[in-house]
Amino acid sequence: MELLQIKKILEEYRQQFEEAFKLVDGANKNLKLCSEKYSQLKTNIGEHLKELEKRERKGQLNVHEQSFLLPAISEVSMHCEARVGSTNIFDLSSSLYDGQDYLNHYLSQLGV
């Protein structure tokens, strides 16, 4: 996988985090929809991480995936601490903010 593909994946995740965050932080708050979006996003990130870890064990990741994609997805997964289905606005806000922050960090490191 090329760096531009990795960038696209991380940007798509970041956009999803931003959209969900707006639902708890904006004028049009919708906690139920935010919870649904966050839950799906957390599930997708977790599944993506499992797939990457499986490929890593088999030696199937290239240097870019090992250096950027796997660490980024791992960090985001680790810091999405709100549970799937959570309606706690503080937990959701914190997890969504942290997810965005780690994605921004790794995107800034890509240099593409």
Image (cartoon, helix red, strand yellow):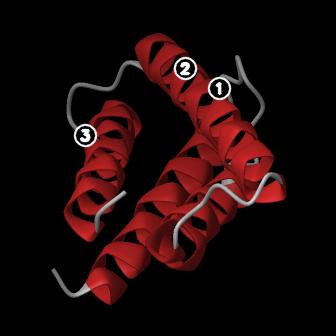
**Disc ID at residue 40:** 2
Q: CA distance from mark 1 to mark 2?
A: 5 Å
Residue at (41, 60) in percent of width and height: 100
Whole-percent x, y for residue 97 in the image:
47, 58
Label 3 vs 1, first from the N-terminus: 3
Q: CA distance from mark 2 to mark 3?
A: 20 Å
**Disc ID at residue 43:** 1
User: In the figure, 30 relative to 106: above or below?
Assistant: above
Q: Are marks 2 and 3 in contact (CB under 8 Å)?
A: no
User: In the figure, 7 relative to 109: above or below?
Assistant: above
Tell me the amino acid under the disc marked 2: Gln
* Tag 3 residue: 26
Quarter of the image with the C terminus is bottom left
Tell me the amino acid under the disc marked 3: Gly
User: In the figure, 79 relative to 23: above or below?
Assistant: below
Could you classify mark 2 by the number of other residues whose Cα lies within 10 Å: few (under 14), some (14-19), or many (20 or more)?
A: some
